[in-house]
Amino acid sequence: MLLTVLVVLGIILGAGALIVDLRRQELAAARSQIAGLSRLLAEQTTRTFDGVALNLYGARDQLAEEIWRPFALDSSAVNMLLRAKASGRPQIKSLFVVDQDGRVVNSSRPDFPRHLVVRERGFFRHFADGDADHDIFISAPEKARVDGQWTYYAAIRLGDAKGAFRGLLVAAVNIEHFESFYQWIGFDFIGRIQLLNEDGYLLAGRPHDDNAIGKQIMPAVVRLRLRDEPPGQLVETEEQTPGGPLFAAYCNVSGYPLAISVAVREDDALLTWQRLARPIVIGGGSVLLILAVALILVRNLLHRAALRAAIEESDDQLRHVMQSVQNAIVVFDAERRVITFNQGAEQLFGIPATAAVDRRIDELLAARLDIPQYQTLRRHIEESARAASPQPRIELIELLRDGEPRPVELSLWSTIVRGKMLLTAVFRSLADQRRAERELLESNRQLHKLSAALENAREEERTRISREMHDELGQLLTGIRMEISWLDRHLGGEPEALSGKIDAIKGLIDQTIAATRRISSELRPLILDHLGFAAAAAWYVDQFTNHTGLQVTLDLPEDEPPQGSPVATALFRLLQESLTNIVRHAKASQASVRLFRDDGYWRLAIEDDGQGFDPVGKWRRAGIGLLGMRERVEMLRGNLSIVSAPGQGTLIEASVPDDDPMEERDVQEQDSGFAGG
């Protein structure tokens, strides 16, 4: 009994230590997850604000061009530019222009208040006072005067030809865009996601707190530490709240005076631990119960009938405990005949307990293991039968069930009961765990691959633009300069020579204009915005055929997606990527492109007669092209399918709903009133 008490105490202490260690691991995993999520959201925020900043910089650069200088800031031409830049950006509610006196003189929204004065607003004072420490300023959120919605503003300075302060170009940023994105985050245990500016004012968050928007909520010590940290470096804190301890991770947003905060409550982070700890505590209670029963048996040793009844009761309780365990438990004797076969074992082996009891364990395992595993496991059973040991022997095996292998963790114990050797085998299925791990690893791999590829593609595009502008325009302009210099030196020469040089200069200028138009059209063809998808597709297919020699048949309907809409842009990019892939990989002689509308969907079908491929294997090792196409279609709630086989060509079909969610959101924002004031 003393030995039993010591063993039970050891088990209880071990279980307690295990529970404490599991708690520590769960908290560490929660901290790691909020740290990774804060970095990921910081990168996503950078990309989102890059879109806002690119629109602002693009509009400012156009206004600085000589062709735009004659236009006043309140002109209709500037208004058309603002509308074009604000179109298709769900994160931008409106773009408006403020003159040097602090008056709103133009806006992409037709219902903005005329001559609204904003000279006392933070985004105007930041640039008007001349103490700007950032090229772009992001204000604290405030309620718009027109619709009462929470809004914050991103502003850049406008200068005249001499660099003097001309006014501001301001974007009203939609807070709901960020909060709706945060709601998509699929981590149920995450308690809080917040977007803050560098002064600690709350810009957006999940869950939405209307009382906290626009207030300074970031702790002062965190603000001071974040200012000294580079983007991507975390500042982690532990805060005490009425609901319990809160773990938070803060991360600077690269390129902008913003920060992302992700937090989780300790109770939420420990939900899994509580589910794991509960069976351990119950098991400890069961062990204490068994110990109590043993004490009763010792006390009643002199009463054989009472002792026998107590033993039978204890055995019955043990059987119920074993039947309640989900893992498969098989107990067999030294002759390897099965004594106990619980419900978990019935499900794992696919036979009832009545058919398994009194059979040899070798018969059950031989039909469900390959020869090497069976021989190894048989040797381990023999070794365990020769020497009883309280320490389990753990093996990873694959049991065959209905012809399919199932990964199982086997724990094997041996003990002596009433002078007889008994062996207990506990089988724990690992199929669900491994499947979940594989799916999670594959999802993370594709996400990381896509994120890295997008970044590389953007840098490569910038490099290509820089190289072409330098090599082509630079050389052409240099040639023009040399020809003009020659003309200057020979003004007194013969008229024929002068006429020839003038013609040469005109030719170089024409080449420069053509090169500029070509580079601009490769970045984004203006015909897509001005004339729509049909004209852009016809133009691109014609250019593509002339350049590659591939014969492409184009079949377009009379109606088409709205000009410049996200649906038109996505379908055009899918057409570009698909034809490029055909030339690179398919070795096709001809291709066909067909656009049609069916049951509320735009369907784009691109088919070639090339060598084809295995689409299942292709998706597993998909490059940035296929991943980007699928991502672009899924962003519009559409579907992308690939039908192909080696030697049988390829059919790529994209289905996109014609009621574009981006367009619906823009309409709702326009109906809600001007939020830029």
Image (cartoon, helix red, strand yellow):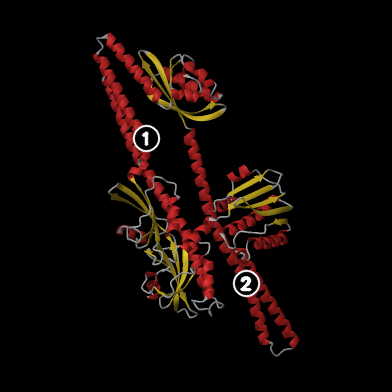
Q: Indicate the amino acid at tag 1.
A: Leu
Res. 471 visible in picture? yes
What label sits on residue 473 in the rendered view? 2
Residue 601 image position (x, y, % from top left) = 60, 52
Residue at x 31% of width, y 25% of height: 287
Q: Quadrant of residue 219?
A: bottom left
Res. 90 visible in picture? no
Report the Cα–Cα distance between label 2 and label 1.
67 Å
| Secondary structure of the residue carrying numbered label 1 | helix
Q: Quarter of the image for the N terminus: give it.
A: top left
| Mark 1 surroundings: few (<14), some (14-19) or many (≥20) residues within 10 A | some
Which residue position holds label 1? 276
The image shows residue 588, relative to residue 197, as above or below, that is above
The image shows residue 410, relative to residue 557, as above or below, that is above
Residue 237 image position (x, y, % from top left) = 33, 52
Counting labels gives 2
The image shows residue 274, relative to residue 172, as above or below, that is above
Residue 430 image position (x, y, % from top left) = 47, 32
What label sits on residue 208 in the rendered view? none
**Residue with the most extreme right position:** 496
Residue 118 image position (x, y, % from top left) = 39, 73
Between circles 2 and 1, the one closer to the viewer is 1
Mark closest to the chain's N terminus, 2 or 1: 1
Residue at x 43% of width, y 52% of height: 182
Q: Indicate the amino acid at tag 2.
A: Leu
Left of 127 or right of it: where is 645?
right
Q: Determine whether label 2 and label 1 are within 8 Å by CB.
A: no
Residue at x 68% of width, y 63% of height: 539
Q: Quadrant of residue 461?
A: bottom right
